[in-house]
Image (cartoon, helix red, strand yellow):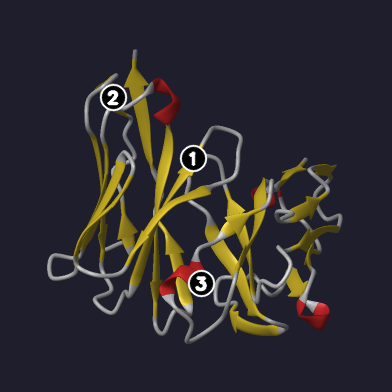
Amino acid sequence: EAGVAQSPRYKIIEKRQSVAFWCNPISGHATLYWYQQILGQGPKLLIQFQNNGVVDDSQLPKDRFSAERLKGVDSTLKIQPAKLEDSAVYLCASSPRGKGASVGSYEQYFGPGTRLTVT
Amino acid sequence: QKEVEQNSGPLSVPEGAIASLNCTYSDRVSQSFFWYRQYSGKSPELIMSIYSNGDKEDGRFTAQLNKASQYVSLLIRDSQPSDSATYLCNLRTGGYQKVTFGTGTKLQVIP
């Protein structure tokens, strides 16, 4: 079974530029997550999708970040314009099922991440 | 009070010893709990999940949950140098909708 795919793996941009990240979850997984992980910290949830609907985007800086999950499969996360403090690893994860399912269905499987450096 | 608290460490244990990692949480309606391991420069990977009070064992790993005291712990028996990593505590609350990670505890197993 193929894992969670992310691209690009690394990206360097200047502040005020825009950037987009792509994620393809494990086939059949209903829930998709985007996290921001700053060095030395735990992952911070940016947005959670269940199929193609948003479950939680309370920590997404909506003035500069946007995300979509068309057709309930792959997803893109965009930052426009980028700031220096956006330098981090952006992780995508997926879980098998959605709300109301057993707890095991919420185990998350992570992609390799995208390391973003904003200069 | 942070939603999820972990001692950042590093926690140093000798090879073969038991490593004990702890996590406390503030939201009493937290429903399910997960431990992830993250090697330096890598993504988190799932170790165990637990949702009922008590112990759950999987190989050298034991997860312990005490909802009354609002803590969850991970014990690693016979610690190996390959266990050296950061261990992340993860909770789900609110009908499984809210997801929160702790900051992680760095474990160092000394040969």
Q: Residue at x 28, y 24 (%)?
A: B12
Q: Position of residue A115 (x, y in %)?
A: 72, 43
Mark sitting on residue A105: 3
Instruction: Pinpoint the chain carrying mark 3.
Output: A
In the image, residue B27 above or below residue B8 = below
Instruction: Say if residue B84 shows up in the picture.
Output: no
Quarter of the image for residue A69 reads: bottom right
Q: Which residue is mark 1?
A: A40
| Mark 3 → mark 2, Cα distance in angstroms | 33 Å
Within 10 angstroms of label 2, few (less than 14), some, or many (20 or more) residues?
few
Q: Amino acid at mark 3?
A: Ser
Q: Position of residue B9 (x, y in %)?
A: 31, 34
Q: Is residue A67 left or right of residue A30?
A: right
| Mark 1 → mark 2, Cα distance in angstroms | 17 Å
Q: Amino acid at mark 1?
A: Gly
Quarter of the image for residue B61 reads: top left
Q: Amino acid at mark 2?
A: Ser
Q: Is residue A35 left or right of residue B3?
A: right
| Mark 1 → mark 3, Cα distance in angstroms | 28 Å
Image quarter hosting the C terminus of chain B:
top left
State the SS at label 3: helix
Front: mark 1 or 2: 2
Mark sitting on residue A52: none
Within 10 angstroms of label 1, few (less than 14), some, or many (20 or more) residues?
few
- The residue closer to the viewer here, B102 or B21, is B21
Q: Which residue is mark 2?
A: B12
State the SS at label 1: loop
Image quarter hosting the N terminus of chain B:
bottom left
Q: Is residue B69 left or right of residue A32?
A: left
In the image, residue A36 above or below residue B80 = below
In the image, residue B108 above or below residue B106 = above
